Image: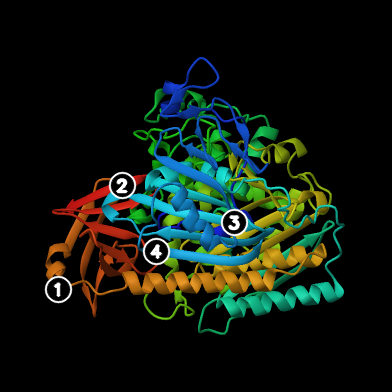
């Protein structure tokens, strides 16, 4: 899995333009069901001065800059720019070109041109210089009444005296549904003269000698700076493992060191390995990528009959089915869930976008595809056991990954106890002191194993990188998978953002001009990255045991490797410092905002057991000095906030859902994450 850490309202983030994402890629997008209803027979139709686009389009701005707009979106010309609306008309993006000496001046001018004033209360503001070819970038998110469920943010970028300001506003679930396309529009702006460093023409230097020493020193220093307890790193180059090493400790406060053979959970990097199982079955002609799900599972259905008929095995891994992300379903009362439930997970769920239209991540959909592949490979076995056996026999063994397992039970009893423990951050206590989490919390992966259950090591993942770079051949020259099947997984199926695409359990993108194939992973207490640069015969694996600043560390290590191997401009230290500063500022803001104790007057109202048919039940009670929510598999202390509109909200302050609000209603509690909302009543 990945992204469980992203529990707050989605916004772009200024560094998204330069960051390496775990998702991406694009077949020609269709339009959503709602947009299709409004689609005219001619090229465009007018509605409230907006034009509906029936095909992807690139539109010029007065300055000569260009911006891409996906099919199905609505477009309107403004005096100083363009405005866009999503197919459902729930998001509006107003992009203006402004002459201004700074982003702050431009922001005020943008509101004036739109005939409005900036809201009084800023939720978060970020400002930086010299980012990805821009002289100055900034982003501000304003606080809106919780009862409105609305996002209001502005992304501003300056080059010389020219500024591009994008005001984003709309419903929070719409941003969750259309986030990839929003990023595609806003961050896809092409401005003459704005050029990020392009390292693609440069040869890859050998990572040895001084370069290797510099890289190792950076990893060690960055781990300490980020307060991540342990990290294991592997680099492969030109068919060999040139580095595999552990840094730090397996568990905070203990002396056991991380090594290249220490097992970590790799989260959603599991997806790329699950598609290799499917690749093996395709090679053996037991299935094809286009085998329909209903051919293998006649009882399968979704809430939409057409989607049910069309879904293929490839679709289950492409994040392009239109099915909404439903991570909260994975987090509550997972101890009683079984893999067989994956076959019924979509019985009542309807897609919120059309098949192939936009990127929507679904761990449950990946689980469905992986378990179907396992049942074909190991017929007659229970799904969990079938997946474990199939991965061992058909994926790990052919690649020589002897320390890797897809079994939760095997992973948690790692031989010689060489197992990293998970860590996470709380909004109570010091930011730089991660909490050691109970390993049992991570068992949430078992019911959706093909999406994120694998335990592996830097050494084994390095072998996987070599096979991926070898297009299916091991370092010893044996064919583990056919080249055609390996490469099929990398073909873009749906676009993600401005530069990226998503294939089958793998993302494609460019990083400082270099084509990359990658996937990130994240569980409650682990963060990982798998990345190869096929054209440069280079690969990187980073495994960490902390979700606190684990992502910042992974990004920094990636950046420094690329700088050293391709003689790039050294930005990694500065960018890591910036990321940690922003992280600390955000943590401090959240700490002051959501970690307040719950008023006595509210304690009686919320104490007790609450239930929801889909999520199960949890109990709120006082434990020590704080009210605590106990889900069974895990518990979290609660914070409190009363907004200016009178809305009272509780907040999880501990992992795995730190920062997620629970809205207190008259006789109920309400949870929302992304497009999904849940109302809980007393049990």
| Disc 1: which residue | 600
Q: Is residue 247 above or below residue 127?
A: below
Mark 2 / mark 3, whichever is N-terminal? 3
Q: CA distance from mark 3 to mark 1?
A: 46 Å
| Disc 4: which residue | 122
Mark 2 / mark 4, whichever is N-terminal? 4
| Disc 2: which residue | 677
Quadrant of the image occupied by residue 234: bottom right
Q: CA distance from mark 2 to mark 3?
A: 34 Å
- Where is residue 251 shown, x and y percent of the image? 52, 77
Q: Report the disc number at residue 157.
A: 3
Q: CA distance from mark 4 to mark 3?
A: 19 Å
- Camera-near label (2 vs 3) is 3
Secondary structure of the residue carrying tag 2 is: strand
Mark 1 / mark 4, whichever is N-terminal? 4
Crowd class of label 3 (few under 14; some 14 to 19; many from 20; radius 10 Å): many
- Camera-near label (2 vs 4) is 4
- Where is residue 130 shown, x and y percent of the image? 66, 65
Q: CA distance from mark 1 to mark 4?
A: 29 Å
Q: Quadrant of the C terminus?
A: bottom left
**Is disc 2 in contact with disc 4, using a CB cutoff of under 8 Å?**
no
**Is disc 4 in contact with disc 3, using a CB cutoff of under 8 Å?**
no
């Amino acid at each position: 899995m990945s992204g469980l850490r992203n529990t707050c309202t989605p916004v772009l983030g200024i560094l998204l333009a330069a960051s390496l994402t775990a998702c991406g890629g694009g077949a020609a997008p269709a339009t959503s069901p709602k947009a299709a209803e409004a689609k005219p027979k001619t090229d465009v139709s007018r509605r409230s001065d907006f034009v509906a686009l029936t095909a992807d389009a690139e539109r010029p701005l007065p300055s000569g800059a260009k911006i891409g707009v996906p099919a199905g979106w609505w477009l309107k010309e403004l005096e100083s720019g363009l405005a866009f609306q999503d197919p459902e008309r729930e998001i509006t993006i107003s992009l203006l070109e402004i002459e201004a000496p700074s982003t702050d001046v431009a922001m005020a001018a943008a509101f004036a041109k739109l005939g409005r004033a900036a809201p009084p209360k800023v939720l978060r503001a970020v400002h930086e210089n010299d980012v990805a070819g821009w002289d100055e970038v900034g982003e501000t998110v304003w606080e809106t009444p919780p009862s409105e469920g609305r996002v209001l943010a502005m992304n501003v970028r300056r080059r010389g005296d020219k500024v591009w300001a994008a005001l984003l506003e709309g419903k929070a679930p719409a941003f969750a549904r259309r986030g990839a396309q929003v990023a595609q529009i806003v961050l896809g702006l092409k401005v003459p003269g704005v050029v990020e460093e392009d390292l693609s023409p440069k040869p890859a230097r050998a990572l040895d000698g001084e370069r290797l020493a510099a890289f190792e020193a950076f990893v060690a220093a960055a781990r300490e700076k980020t307060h991540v307890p342990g990290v294991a790193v592997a680099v492969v180059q030109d068919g060999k493992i040139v580095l595999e090493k552990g840094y730090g400790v397996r568990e905070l406060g203990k002396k056991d060191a991380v090594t290249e053979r220490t097992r970590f959970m790799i989260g959603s990097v599991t997806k790329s390995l699950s598609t290799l199982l499917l690749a093996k079955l395709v090679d053996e002609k037991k299935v094809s990528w286009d085998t329909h799900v209903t051919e293998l599972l006649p009882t399968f259905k979704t809430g939409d009959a057409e989607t049910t008929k069309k879904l293929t095995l490839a679709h289950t891994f492409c994040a392009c089915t239109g099915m909404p992300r439903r991570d909260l379903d994975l987090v509550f009362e997972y101890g009683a869930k079984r893999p067989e439930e994956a076959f019924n997970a979509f019985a009542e769920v309807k897609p919120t976008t059309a098949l192939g239209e936009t990127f929507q991540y679904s761990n449950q959909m990946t689980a469905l595809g992986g378990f179907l592949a396992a049942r074909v490979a190991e017929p007659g076995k229970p799904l969990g056991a079938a997946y474990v056996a199939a991965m061992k026999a058909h994926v790990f063994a052919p690649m020589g990954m002897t320390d890797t397992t897809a079994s939760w039970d095997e992973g948690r009893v790692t031989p010689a106890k060489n197992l990293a423990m998970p860590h996470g951050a709380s909004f109570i206590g010091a930011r730089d002191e991660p909490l050691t989490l109970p390993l049992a919390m991570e068992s949430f992966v078992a019911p959706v194993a093909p999406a994120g259950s694998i335990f592996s090591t830097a050494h084994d993942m390095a072998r996987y990188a070599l096979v991926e770079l070898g297009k299916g051949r091991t370092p010893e020259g044996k064919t583990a998978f056919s080249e055609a099947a390996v490469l099929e997984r990398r073909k873009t199926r749906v676009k993600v953002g401005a530069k990226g695409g998503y294939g089958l359990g793998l993302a494609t993108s460019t990083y400082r001009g270099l084509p990359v194939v990658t996937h990130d992973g994240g569980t409650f207490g682990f963060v990982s990255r798998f990345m190869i640069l096929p054209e440069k015969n280079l690969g990187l694996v980073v495994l960490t045991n902390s979700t606190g600043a684990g992502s910042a560390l992974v990004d920094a290590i990636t950046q420094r490797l690329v700088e050293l191997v391709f003689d790039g401009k050294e930005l990694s230290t500065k960018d890591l410092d910036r990321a940690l500063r922003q992280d600390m500022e955000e943590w401090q803001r959240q700490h002051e905002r959501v970690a307040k104790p719950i008023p006595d007057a509210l304690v009686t109202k919320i104490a007790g057991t609450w239930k929801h048919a889909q999520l199960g039940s949890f109990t709120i009670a006082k434990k020590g000095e704080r009210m605590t929510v106990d889900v069974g598999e895990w518990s979290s202390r609660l914070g409190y906030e009363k907004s200016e509109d009178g809305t009272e909200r509780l907040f999880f302050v501990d992992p795995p859902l730190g920062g997620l609000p629970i809205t207190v209603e008259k006789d109920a509690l309400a949870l929302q994450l992304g497009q999904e909302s849940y109302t809980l009543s007393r049990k």
